[in-house]
Image (cartoon, grey):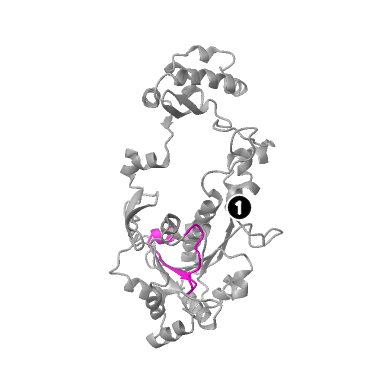
Amino acid sequence: MAQPANQTSAAAHDAAPVASTALQGLRVLDLTRVRSGPTCVRQLADWGADVIKIEAPVDTAQFGGPRSGPDFQNLHRNKRSLTLDLKTEKGLEAFKRLADSADIVVENFRPGVKKRLGIDYDTLSQTNPGLIYASISGFGQDGPLADRPGFDQIAQGMGGLMSITGEPGRGPMRVGIPIADLCAGLFAAQGILIALFERQKSGKGQWIQTSLLQAQVFMLDFQAARWLMNGEVAGQAGNNHPTTIPTGVFPTSDGFMNIAVAGEVIWQRFAKALGREDWIEDARYGTAPDRSKNREALNAEIAGITATQPTAHWIDMLIEAGVPAGEINDISQVFETPQVRHLGLAQPVTSQERGDTELVGQPIIMSRTPSQIAAPPPMAGQHSADILSEIGYSEAEIAEMKAAGAT
C-alpha cells in the first residue's frame, strides 16, 4: 500500500486548505469523464482525499460545457490537475509510477480501453497490491451489452424508470436529473469506502465494478420488489403515489402543494382537518384498498377543498394536524428556503474562471470532520510540476516530458 508517497503528499499539503480531515492522506487518481465518474470522485475530494485529475495535455471539449460552466465547476472542485498523454511512453510511465503511490484509481472508460492502455486493475495491482480500483461503465465490465456506450437516459429507459415516470397514457418520461449517472457514482464511492475498510484487515485492494444499469435497477427499490415478489408490473402514476393514497399534488388558490397521507391514523387526521370526517365512514374511502379503487373521485373532492385557500394556509393547518405537507418549489425558491440556508447547502467558492460564486456542498453533516469546498476546480495541468516532483521527477525530466507532449 502506497505509504511513503502518501506521507510525502500529505506533508506537502499540510499548509494548504483541505476539504476535510476525514479522508486526508489518501491519494486518488481520477481518470473519469462526463458525470458518473466525476460524481464518485467528488465524494472523495470533498472529504479530504488528495484527488489528482488526469487530463490530456491538449484540452478537449468537456461534456456539459466549458471548464467555466456550472456543470464542470460543480463536479471538479477540491482536486488537483495533472496533464498526461497516456498514449505516449513517458506519459504512461509517469501514470504507472503515480499509481504505485496511489490508494485509489477511478475510471469510467468503455470496458476494453483500460486493458489496451495497460492501466487495468490486474496490471496496476501487480506492483501495488493494496490498490483499490473502481470502474464505472454503462452496462457492466462483461456480458452481452458490455461494449454498448452508456448514457444516463438510455439507462433510465432500460432500467425501467421511464416506464413508471410521468402521467398514465402520456408515454415514457425521463426524470429531471441524470439519476443513473449520479447513483452509479455514489455507489462506486460507497464501494471504495467499503474496500478501504476491508483493506485495514486484509492489507489488499480489490476491483470495484458498478454501472449505470445496475444503479438504475437497484434504485427501482420497492417497485422492483413488487415485481420480484408479487409479479406486479408497476405503471405510471403521475404525481400520485403508486400505493399510498391520497398522496400527491393538489391545487391551491395560489399554486400547488404536496400532501402525503400514509396509513390509517394520518388518513383520519387528514379527513378531520379538512372538515370531512364523513370520509372516514364512507364506504368508498374507509380503507386503503377502497381509497385505491376510488382514487380519482377522492382526489377530485380533495382538490375542490384545497383550491379555496393559498398554499401557506393548508401547509400550516395540515402540519398542525400531524399530516405531512409541503410546498413545491422551483430551484430558485429551494435556495431561498430558510431551512436550506440553515443547512448550508450552498457554499461559497472563488472560481478561477468566474470569481466569487457558490456550489452545492455535501448533504452530510459530520460533528468532527466536516466537508467544505476548499478549492475551486483546477486549471488543466495546474499542478503537473508539483505532482510529478512528488513522485521523483526532476525539473529537467519534467521539462523533457513537456517538450515531448507527454504532460
Secondary structure category for the residue under label 1: helix
User: Most extreme residue toward the bottom, as rendered?
Assistant: 396
User: Most extreme residue toward the left, as rendered?
Assistant: 15
x%, y% of residue 290?
Answer: 60, 20
Residue at left offset 52%, top offset 14%:
279
x%, y% of residue 339?
Answer: 34, 39
Is residue 27 at all visible to an observer of this figure? no
* Quarter holding residue 381: bottom left
Residue at left offset 53%, top offset 50%:
178
Residue at left offset 61%, top offset 42%:
162
User: Most extreme residue toward the right, as rendered?
Assistant: 144
* Quarter holding residue 88: bottom right
- In this orientation, which residue lies closer to the viewer: 242 or 322? 242
x%, y% of residue 78?
Answer: 38, 62
Based on the picture, tell me whether residue 44 belongs to the magenta stretch: yes
Q: Which residue is mark 1?
A: 214
Is residue 86 at all visible to an observer of this figure? yes
Q: Which three-letter amino acid code belongs to the residue tagged 1?
A: Gln
Based on the picture, tell me whether residue 67 belongs to the magenta stretch: no
Question: Magenta residues, as a range?
Answer: 43-65
User: Horizontally, is 9 left or right of 128 in the view?
Assistant: left
User: Horizontally, is 142 left or right of 193 in the view?
Assistant: right
